[in-house]
Amino acid sequence: MQSQTTDILIVGVGGQGTLLTSRIIAQVAVQLGYDVKVSEVHGMAQRGGSVVTQVRYGKKIYSPIIKKGEADVILAFEKIEAARWLDYLKADGMVIINNERVNPLPVMSGKAKYPEDIHEKVAALVEKTVVVDATDIAARCGNVKAANVVLVGILSQAIGLPVEEVEKAIRAIVPGKALEVNQEAFREGRKLLEQTV
Amino acid sequence: MKKLMIGNAAIARGAYEAGATVATAYPGTPSTEIVSNFAQYEGVYAEWSPNEKVAMEVGAGASIGGARTLVAMKHVGVNVAADPLYTFAYTGVNGGLVIVSGDDPGMHSSQNEQDNRGYGRFAKLPVLEPADSQEALDFTRMAFNLSEEYDTPVMLRVTTRLAHSQTMVEEGERTDLPLKDYEKNAAKYVMLPGHARMRHIEVEKRMLKLGEYAETTPLNSIEWGSKEVGIITSGVVYQYVKEVLPEVSVLKLGMTNPLPQNLIKSFAEQVDRLIIIEELEPVIEEQVKSWGIKVEGKELFSLLGEYSPEMIEAKLGQAKPVRSYGLDKEIPARPPLMCPGCPHRGVFHTLHKMKLAVMGDIGCYTLGALSPLDGMDACICMGASIGSAMGMEKARGEDFASKTVAVIGDSTFVHSGITALIDVVYNQGTSTVMILDNDTTAMTGHQEHPGTGMTIRQQATNKLDIEGLVKAVGVKNIRIVDPLNLVELEATLKEELNRREPSVIITKRPCVLLDKIPNTVKYYVDEELCKGCKLCLKVGCSGIYFIEEDKKAVMHASCVACGLCPQICTFDAIKKVEG
Ligand SMILES: Cc1ncc(C[n+]2csc(CCOP(=O)(O)OP(=O)(O)O)c2C)c(N)n1
């Protein structure tokens, strides 16, 4: 067991399924015998607002929320959300960005522009930046909704969680009929980072 | 074996283990999952009550009837339940009663951030504040014992961060308790002035005894560290203190009303610098200061919002400077918005177009206030829409009323809209009221309510007939329309606004998230016909967007083909995919 704490920030748009991802990662940490805390977002922001879920594990965890500048990994389900939360990343942290664009309200109403190249800006600032097309990969696995499990694959590889433990957690958390697609999505996600890093 | 649980699930578990057999609630973030989790246990009764006052009253009855009872609501719900709560604090309990207040510092999902520890002092209730899910379970169990031992309802005060954080919990066994005997005892339960005067004496005696209990209870404890700084704190803020100030001495209060005066005094004497860190109101600080103790609190920490570890570190610790990339300033905000296909969108598009004054209410439809829909003038609390439309009319006259509507959701109408509608009829208002019936309590995550005809356990039950109710109140003009049929909606509104009588327009269409049947219809934008006028963007829907380079609108994958934007496009460019 590592002695330090692992801090993961999972950000996205309400309704994108960030909660499932955080629950799988947290479950793995429980299986490995860590103390774990997860801070979730329920309520209004789930209606398409900016949401952040925080997972912390280690020997002993006090705060359920991560301090600015301390996250080991930021996993962003949407491009601009990665930028919104970037100050939470620690100096040598990793950012994983799903190459997905979801227009926020000010963009829809013409009051703001969507910064298309935002993931490139992040990559220019953060050495360990990975951009993936999780939605496409999930579609190839049989269901776009499994994009969040593709991201579990990438994330779990990034923080060095054992494959068998993650698969066990997925079996425990993902409902029966969606399981097969999700397992496939997980393996594809896992492979992706092996190739990139 | 330990497992992860959100605070709310742990509270439900604690109540179950304590032998509670009745639980009541009206949903409200961050309290909703408490009673929905409790309802999963077998052999217990749980209900969604129509509002918090009823939840409190059913709870009081169950307690008088001898059952251990859990009542849960969000902070503002306690305002609604306050009337029975204050006097139930006089009668005391038979079976233990625990009321959970879900406070929302930072207003993640609320219209204010009142600190309900104030209720503890005002209504003279013991208040417990857990700091993680294990404590949420343990304190709930203890709260039932305290309730019976001291003959008082007990408030368990949690905040959003506790309610919605998962931490490790070790479950215990349920204690099956026999129902307590019920004996008629009018002097205790009938609060006539003569009886109440006697009960008030009991309340004050009880507070003194609880004050003694507070001195020795394991709920309050000191963790000694360096004596240079001593911190008094409670709830989840305790975790932030431990995270960033591991070296200081901490007096952790699990019980914040009444306070352990001697324990605090002796802690104060032993440290060089005493600091109280509490989110929101200086509830502990003002009392401690009133005892003549020198302490710092709100001069360091804000009255506003939710605290964080770095906030505490910045004031008292060794904060490292955090590098800022500054990218967050470059990107647009992302407020919540109505889902693609939301039936409320048609309503607010129309209200905005007709330039009406809209007295709004609380629910998903409050999002109709945001640009580009911009469809709301006021929104105060649940149920306020109809009363405030009536007030506008009485202030500004009937002509103004013919340009004003009250807009209220189905769950909110049942919660607290009915009495205001009675006022409109009784006091001869002419208000036009829209009840947006989407067959659920959507904002808080789709709970059943009396109008859905289903119980908290998803079993069929008697269904409230909203239309029949409105008629019974005395409203003669009742119209039912589809909120996504814009022509019909606008025509109906015009007719009813011009009528110098009260009218109710019920818009009927289920919440799109409840619609399990996939829509086989699909739309596309005909590139030839699209003139790039952006009119379709006026509905504020993420199901359609605009490509600036091409000057064309396109459908997004999230479109559910509700058919709203095709009605708005003046060039007929949004078309059904054939076949
Ligand atoms: C007194 C009080 N109780 C609970 C809440 C939490 N809450 C906000 S909106 C809402 C209900 C919304 O349901 P409905 O009126 O049917 O509108 P919908 O969200 O379905 O559009 C609830 C329970 C609150 N704000 N105030």
Image (cartoon, coloured by chain):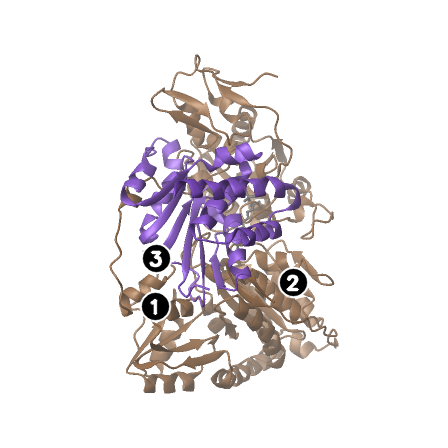
Chain colours: A purple, B brown
* Of labels 1 and 2, the one closer to you: 1
Question: Could you tell me which secondary element the residue under label 3 belongs to?
Answer: loop
Relative image position of residue A105 (x, y in whole percent): 40, 36
Image quadrant of residue A193? top left
Which chain does the numbered disc 1 sit on?
B
Q: Evaluate whether residue B58 shows in this view.
A: no
Q: Nearer the viewer, residue B388 or A49?
A: A49
* Of labels 3 and 1, the one closer to you: 3
Which residue is tagged 2?
B23
Mark 2 is on which residue type? Ala
Q: Is mark 3 within 8 Å of ligand 1?
A: no
The residues tagged by marks 1 and 2 sit, at their Cα atoms, a distance apart of 38 Å
Q: Nearer the viewer, residue A62 or B54?
A: A62
Question: Could you tell me which secondary element the residue under label 2 belongs to?
Answer: strand
Dot 3: within a 10 Å radius of its alpha carbon, few (fewer than 14), some, or many (20 or more) residues? many
First in residue order: circle 1 vs circle 2 = 2
Relative image position of residue A174 (x, y in whole percent): 60, 47
Q: Are marks 1 and 2 on the same chain?
A: yes
